[in-house]
Amino acid sequence: MRKTFRKLRGKTGLVLLATTAVVAAAGTALALPVPAAGDLGYDIYTLFMDIKDGPVGYAGAGIGIAGAAFLGYKSQWIPAIGALLGTGAIVKADTIVQSLGALIG
């Protein structure tokens, strides 16, 4: 038992304990669907998706990938990975919104 408490004194143990407590206390979640026509966010959603799927989106993705390559060339790996993940999230934003939705608990 003492070994367990000694492990929990470190930062890793505290994070593990907090994560376990949050997961155990979580209730049901409500997933919001993609906005339908006439909803408040529908116009903003369609505007963003139209821009993202057009030439501006492709140019933005190219700039994001080029920026990540430049950061990787300068051996700044963490910002390069962040740029790649951010670019990928923007490219797949419609899929992310449709599959995950916003969780409200």
Image (cartoon, grey):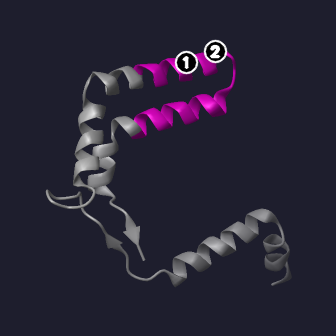
Q: Which residue is mark 2?
A: 73
Q: Amino acid at mark 1?
A: Ala
Figure check: 6 above or below 45: below
Label 2 Cα neighbours within 10 Å, binned few <14 / some 14-19 / many ≥20: few
Query: In which quadrant is the N terminus drawn?
Result: bottom right
Q: Which residue is mark 1?
A: 69
Residue shown at 33% from the left, 60% from the top: 101
Per the image, label 2 sits on a secondary structure element best described as: helix
Q: Amino acid at mark 2?
A: Tyr
Residue shown at 37% from the left, 63% from the top: 102
Specify whether 84 is left or right of 72.
left
**Distance between the alpha carbons at the discs numbered 1 and 2:** 6 Å
Residue shown at 60% from the left, 75% from the top: 20
Magenta-colored span: 62-89
Instruction: State the residue in front, 65 or 34.
Output: 34
Instruction: State the residue in front, 80 or 37.
Output: 37
Residue 100 position by quadrant: bottom left
Q: Are marks 1 and 2 in contact (CB under 8 Å)?
A: yes
Query: In which quadrant is the C terminus drawn?
Result: bottom left
Residue shown at 79% from the left, 77% from the top: 4
